[in-house]
Image (cartoon, rainbow, N blue to C red):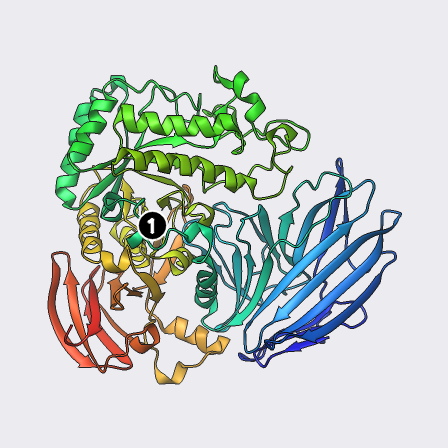
Amino acid sequence: MVLDNGVMRIVFDDANGMLTHLIDVAGDVVHVAPPDEPLGIWKLVFRAGTDEQSLVWPPWKGEFEGSVAKESDGAQVATLLWRDMWFRHEPEAVDVAVTVRLPEESGTSEWRIRVSNRSARYGLWEVRFPWFNHWPAPKEYNVAIPWHNWGHRYQKVAEKHTGEYSSYTWSMQFLTFESGQRGLTIAALDPEQHYKSYLVDPGNETAFVLRVPDGSKPGVGLDDTYATAISVHGDGWFGGCKLYREWAIGQKWCAKGPISRRKDVPKTLKDIGIWLLSSIPEKNSGVTPAEWADGVIAAQRYFDVPVGIQIYQWHEIKFDNDYPEYFPPKPGVPEAVRKLVDAGIVAMPYINARLWDMRARSYPGAIPSTAKDPTGTPYLEIYGPESGLLTPMCTQTKLWQDTVFNLCKRIYEEIGANAIYLDQVAAMPAAPCYDPTHGHPLGGGHHWHDGYRVILNRVKDYIASTGRDLFLTTENPGDAHIDGCDAFLIWNPRQDTEVPMMTSVYSGYTLYYASNHTTGEGMQSFVMAQARDFLWGSQLGWMPPEIPEPFRGYLRKLGKLRVQTRKFLTYGELVGMPANTAPDEIRGSSDEMMRRREDAVVKVSANWPFFGTPKIATLPAVMSALWRAEDGHLGLFIMNLSEAKQSYRCTFNPSAYGLTSGRLRYTKIQESGPTDSFEVVGGVQVRSEDLEPFGGVVYEISPAGT
């Protein structure tokens, strides 16, 4: 059975439905073909109590048939049916139906699966689909995974990777495998955002794993839910991000439109140039909350940009203890917070919007609303030796919905804050809940995200009723919450394997903030982290108000530059990252040419500690980014990450990004605003810059005469 549209070729074995060929015809990349072993495409996991059993083809008994048809629009569709499969001595217990649709002249195929389960004992616990056993081979591909802060690109992957959606371990529903400059992207086109995970274990298996709703019940199967796209394309991981963006911005979490048109995201957030981070002093510290507020205001005056501060320990209870009993606040906190707000600062207290402490006095009344494991036991989480005994609450319960809403309302009204940070909402995956009294499907499904949407919408409705400029943020990026949370804290230690997958997809639709980094490793280490985060679109900071010089001065410089370039970094789209132009003799798209180009780039290295463990990070000495504003103008950002002068030369074509004018104007933007400008002929641009140590340059590129 062959699907071939001249862009992509997919072949299934006529006898058993296994995948024998997966070929990127347009890019001349063979992903699967003889002599490779044919691949299975699905794996089913069943459960009866704690007894877990798997089913793959071929079963003990069963039948297969398949066919290919052509639709009126030219799309080719393969229909694969595995019928009457025996399972655990139950005859004719399971059917599987898969369809694969390949539109005409498209590099994207759409895969769907349905499972009928007639077992009297087992429920369908999870479906691994697509599931490719043995693929990929170790060290055959680079893999880009959207997780942690920005996303990571791991080269020649041999180790196992896994993550859960939606959480910091898998923030968007896709992965991209790179071969040279070509990409193979697998994306779950799931508008309801079911609880799912991924698995990449080179040499063993690659799979998207769906936890089946009510899968603990005998006889439960899986109806058609959503398509999974397998696409071949150019531009590697970046091309995969742009494919996902095309689909994602049409989904419900982006239905409110770009940031520029979102009335529920206030200007106070959009305008922030620097974020600060601090805790309210303890009573015996010798510093009053009012004096603490004066220090924050002094920092605001120094940075001379709109400032936000995330506030910890504003409550009497210890951190990670006695949640959610945050009230009463420490004495003097409401007055200190109002002092900050009156000074034009965004004052954002912390709460955890997920956990209840089992040792809190109020916990007995919360037990019915906790998320339960399959045995009916509340989950337990402990965060270090000082932590309480914390349990995640089921988002579908009225108690938890009311608790989070009422906390937010009190913080806005009684504390006087103009923003609230909701910890763990986007960071942590669903706690699959098996409490039948909550009224949701057991285990799998999309009710976890639906419950948070109820909570966040209630808070948003309240905010709208106040007429105040208030907003919400949460921890780590997670696209399930873009419509409810207005910005995402990307606080995890930086690594040199990161690539800007988040802003490649959602720039212009949401905001990411923080660039927290130690000053203890010197200026080189600090600048590498700050300059890269600036290029990729983060609102910088999330550092103490008293950060010392020279780090303080560099942060101020970038904060002021961000304010001047908001049309790009806040409202625009990240559309490219021009590379340092290579000599003619090492151009080309092969792995060898790409390696030689990489080796030719001047690098800079420094220690980037990872949760206290020393780790050397290596980046290009000069990095750049190309952003497109809503008016069609381009922003070319070039930063020298090194303490030495650097020369940089890049090539890009503005017409590829919609700027087709015959003559172009370059306007230099500095911390004080636009300065000198000059005109050039349109078409392919070659820019050469001599950069001072830790220096940079930003140009706005527009049609001449505008």
Between 363 and 281, the residue placed more toward the observer is 363
Task: Give the quadrant of the C terminus.
Answer: bottom left
Residue at 23% x, 43% y is: 268
State which quadrant residue 464 falls in.
top left
Residue 577's x, y, as percent? 34, 67
Q: Is residue 349 above or below residue 220?
A: above
**246 is higher (above) or lower (below) than 562:** below
- How many labels, in total? 1
Residue ID at (63%, 63%): 111
Residue 602 in the image, given as x and y percentages of width and height: 32, 68
Q: Residues within 10 Å of mark 1 (few under 14, many from 20)?
A: many
How far from the left and from the top, in percent, is residue 40?
72, 63
- Under mark 1, the amino acid is Leu
Foreground residue among 680 and 546: 680
On screen, 55 above or below 343? Answer: below
Q: What residue is shown with label 1?
A: 511
